[in-house]
Amino acid sequence: KTYSEPFRPQFHFSPEKKWMNDPNGLLYYKGIYHLFYQYYPEDIVWGPMHWGHATSTDLIHWKHHKIALFPDKLGYIFSGSAVVDVNNTSGLGTLKNPALVAVYTYHNMDIEKAGGINAQSQGLAYSLDEGENWSKYQGNPIIENSDLKDFRDPNVFWNKETNTWNLILVSGDHAQFYTSKNLINWTLESEFGKGIGAHGGVWECPNLFKIKVENSIDEKWILLISVNPGAPNGGSGTQYFVGDFDGKNFKTDQKDTKWLDNGADNYAGVTYNDAPDNKRIFIGWMSNWLYARNTPTKNWRSAMTLPREISLSKINNNYVLKNAPVAQLKSQLEKGFSKNLLVLKPKQKTTFNYNNLNQSQIGFSADAKTLKLVFSNDVKDSLVLNYDGKQKTFSIDRRHSGNVNFEPNFGKSIHTTATPNIISETIDYQIILDWSSIEIFLNGGVYSFTEQIFPKKPFTKLTIQSDENQEIKNISIHKIKGIW
Ligand code: FRU
């Protein structure tokens, strides 16, 4: 049965069947969150790309819709974004019934096969029935490409400050910034990125947005850039830049490379246009190009991260982008187990038995000292999390977490992250496991870690230990209800 296959996520979005990668066209309109995604309906590996489509009213429960965009003679349909053309600037809808407009990349296989490098261009499609049916714009492509190999993933939004449309796309080692009055004719204004940030591979899936700085009247612009390969744990990952944007140029004085998530499996993530209450809601693809095609699932492949709310904090006089699960997740928690206080003595182990930790949320707050958590089962799979209070690092060891041999990189090493932005005396832990993933949030998302895991049986034991005296407060374990 669908959604009960081995490793099938129970409360994360995954397609009913076949291959999925990046989230696309994240748009909120008339009470509905749209999620489009890179989709190949014929196989569980990447192929000619379509846009699949799902919707949600609460970001937790998803309804599948028919495929929104099919490849056409201009090419496969790669990643992109969507907006509501409220003022009918494009003339494709009416003021009464504005068009939903999707801007995406065409990848032309004929050009690629003939040895041409300019296989990618930008196309436009629109829907006049709230996203159900889509028509391609007759004049496609709307942004042509003369000589760039990588030229893709347009991110469009309405800039309230300049009353124009902005579009950001990536071209190999940099991003390009465009403006338009009508979503169709675009002017290249500037470029950003050469020699700054991580460049282990090509830049992909940009997303630019403005956000308030917590506890301040300041606002900053955030530029998300995915890069593959070149992420800290190998393969693909998403970095961000904090800066200013005047409608044409993005500037930053940032020197360091910042990562949105420090786990191995959060890629190509972008945020919703027009989400209510000025919220910035993020969804990432919960995989990594290093082994995305090899994960041990049947019928379908891969899932999205939980939708997360993004916020910006200043810590150690440095901007830190936080991300944590949307509050709506709380409605999925069943009445759980809780314990007010656990006092750990050095080397003493405390074990909690629980029937299925792979569909649960674990929360507690602990002294910012060394703490080791081991998830295990009776077939000797184990997943080890370790906060090292002296070195100030957090690590995830999934080397023995179950099925890890499907691809050599998956279980190769322990993933360790320096955590200088943990400056509190206690750390809040929020840990969420589904049948094939773990998401860890420290201090409300100051650090997040997202990883896939494929235990042969669900984890049923959680062992906690420290090498120091340690107090752990408000431990809770909640089952998370399935959504399918
Ligand atoms: C990122 C990406 C995008 C591209 C899409 C193709 O994962 O490589 O750059 O548009 O996937 O499916």
Image: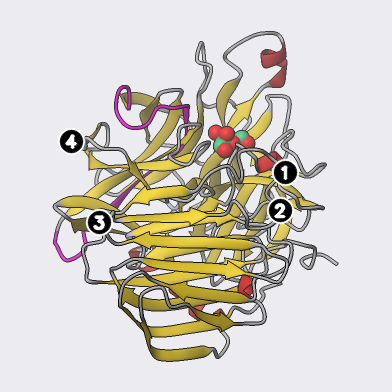
For the residue pair 262 and 472, the one nearer the viewer reads as 472
| Residue underneath mark 2 | 403
Residue 406: which numbered mark, if any?
A: 1
Where is residue 13? Give x, y as percent.
63, 61
- Disc 2 + disc 1, Cβ < 8 Å: yes
Name the residue that disc number 3 marks. 421
- Please tell me which of labels 4 and 2 falls first in the chain: 4
First-in-chain label (4 vs 1): 4
**Marks 3 and 1, how far apart at CA:** 35 Å
Distance from Cα at disc 4 to Cα at disc 2: 43 Å
Point out the frontmost of discs 3 and 4. Answer: 3
In percent of the image, x 63 and y 58: which residue is there? Answer: 401
> Which class describes the residues within 10 Å of circle 1: few (<14), some (14-19), or many (20+)?
few
- Give the labeled residue for mark 4: 253
Earlier residue among tags 3 and 1: 1
Residue type for callout 2? Asn
Q: Nearer the viewer, mark 4 or mark 1?
A: 1
| Element class at badge 2 | loop
Give left or right: position of 236 versus 300. Answer: left
* Lateral position of residue 458 relative to residue 443, left or right: right
Dividing the image into four quarters, tell me where ligand 1 lies: top right
Q: Let me know if residue 242 is in the magenta part.
A: no
Query: Which range is magenta?
Result: 193-217
Q: Could you tell me how many numbered marks the image carries?
A: 4
Q: Amino acid at mark 4?
A: Asp
Badge 1 marks a residue whose secondary structure is loop
Q: CB atoms at circles 3 and 4 under 8 Å apart? A: no
